[in-house]
Image (cartoon, rainbow, N blue to C red):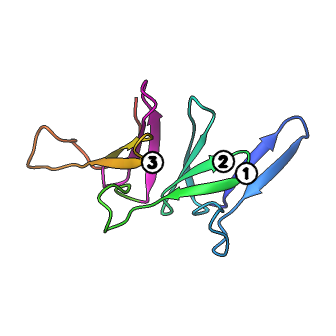
Amino acid sequence: MGGLNSYDPKSNRFSHFKHDKDDPNSLSHDRVSVIFEDSKGILWIGTITGGLNRYDKSSGYFQHFKHSKTDPYSISNNHILSIYEDPEGDLWIGTNIHGLNKYDRKQQRFTQLKHDKSDADRLSSGTIVSIY
């Protein structure tokens, strides 16, 4: 609810990251829901209404991935619940109500997989709380 904290055991200090509406490189929202470190050491932070963040450790900047009604390759929802990396290095992002997203790093775009109660071959639910 209050942003993101990072603990450095060497210095015994915390760094605190919060959303700043005047800084486009800050955390997209203070309500953090999930944190995931991928195989390349990149930190991905999901938020309740601010979408997905990619944290660049060297610059200290956050890159934001948010839903856009006009972009079919954007993430399907800004309420992120789960993150998983597959063996090919693509990310799978679970959202609240709006299904699952596959992030293709090479093309830098999302494929949306949504629940459709009339189609038994699709997701059984739009809420994806964990991915294994």
Between disc 3 and disc 2, whose residue precedes?
2
Span colored in magenta: 78-99
Q: Which mark is residue 81?
A: 3
**72 relative position to 121: left or right:** right
Left or right placement of residue 114 versus residue 10 in this view: left
Residue topped by disc 1: 59
Q: Residue furthest front?
A: 107
Q: What kind of residue is marked 2?
A: Asp
Q: Label 3 is placed on what type of residue?
A: Leu
Magenta-drawn stretch contains 11 = no
- Measuring from the top left, give residue 29's x and y in whole percent: 58, 63
Query: Is 21 positioned to the left or the right of 100 in the image?
Result: right
Q: Is residue 129 visible?
A: no
Q: Nearer the viewer, residue 26 or 71?
A: 71
Q: Is residue 46 visible in this depiction of the protein?
A: yes
Residue 84 magenta? yes
Query: Separation of disc 1 and disc 2 at Cα?
Result: 6 Å
Find the distance from the CA under tag 3 to the CA under tag 2: 21 Å
Q: Which of pointers 1 and 3 lies earlier in the amino acid sequence?
A: 1
SS state under label 2: strand
* Residue at the image position 43 percent from the left and 40 percent from the top: 106
